[in-house]
Image: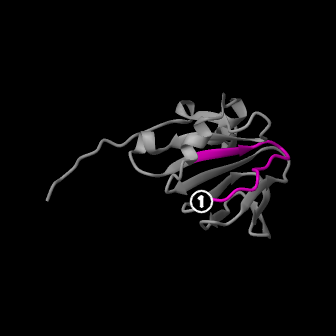
């Protein structure tokens, strides 16, 4: 039996590369891990929706996409069924499901997004326009927005 030791990859929010897939998109995706980094077919990112922002309706042929809402609230639609989502909720989108997420709350909506297999998702994200994470994004991602002042 071959034993393979791998040093874990550790990243912090300041290391994440963020993109808008299209210049007029109202959401940004910050890549945490992708096939280039993880050496496996997955994409893990943070999706950040501006107030009123949404994804365009989309589908994946083979990939399962999962979301975990960190902050904010919105509506998730898959194959015509719409459900409210808010911080702490998880959403699983099966392959071929036509889906979109819309921020309906005050302020930004933040969600962790996992796609397995990658199905060229990371490549699509990286083909967009590079953007910076701002102070609010970094406060949410480091959870310093949840600290109680002394």
For residue 131, above or below residue 25: above
Magenta-span inclusion, residue 84: no
Magenta-span inclusion, residue 47: yes
Residue sitting at the far front: 61
Q: Nearer the viewer, residue 18 or 128?
A: 128
In the image, what residue occupies the spot 56% across and 34% down?
Answer: 16
Tag 1: Cα neighbours inside 10 Å, few (<14), some, or many (≥20)? many
Please, which colouring scheme is shown? one colour
Query: Residue 127, position in %: x, y?
Result: 61, 35
Q: Is residue 150 visible?
A: no
In the image, what residue occupies the spot 70% across and 38% down?
Answer: 149
In the image, what residue occupies the spot 70% across and 30% down?
Answer: 135
Query: Residue 12, position in %: x, y?
Result: 51, 36
Q: Nearer the viewer, residue 5 or 116?
A: 116
In this image, 113 relative to 78: left or right? left
Query: Residue 33, position in %: x, y?
Result: 49, 43
Q: Nearer the viewer, residue 67 or 140?
A: 67
**Region rendered in magenta:** 45-60
**Quadrant that contains the N terminus:** bottom left
| Residue on which the image places disc 1 | 65
Magenta residues, dominant SS class = loop
Residue sitting at the far left: 1
Tally of numbered discs: 1
Query: Residue 53, position in %: x, y?
Result: 81, 46
In the image, what residue occupies the spot 57% across and 48% down?
Answer: 121
Residue sitting at the far bottom: 81
**Quadrant that contains the C terminus:** top right
For residue 16, above or below residue 97: above
Q: Quadrant of residue 104?
A: bottom right
């Amino acid at each position: 039996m071959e034993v393979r030791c791998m040093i874990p990859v550790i990243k912090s929010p300041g290391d994440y590369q963020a993109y808008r897939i299209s210049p007029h998109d109202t959401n940004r995706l910050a890549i945490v891990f992708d096939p280039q980094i993880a050496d496996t077919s997955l994409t893990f990112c943070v999706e950040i929706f501006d107030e009123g922002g949404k994804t365009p309706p989309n589908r994946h042929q083979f990939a399962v996409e999962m979301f975990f809402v960190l902050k904010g609230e919105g509506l998730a639609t898959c194959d015509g069924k719409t459900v409210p989502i808010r911080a702490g909720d998880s959403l699983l989108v099966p392959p071929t499901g036509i889906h979109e997420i819309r921020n309906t709350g005050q302020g930004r909506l933040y969600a962790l997004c996992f796609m397995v297999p990658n199905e060229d998702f990371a490549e699509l994200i990286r083909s967009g326009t590079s953007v910076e994470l701002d102070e609010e994004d970094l406060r949410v991602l480091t959870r310093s927005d949840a600290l109680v002042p002394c």
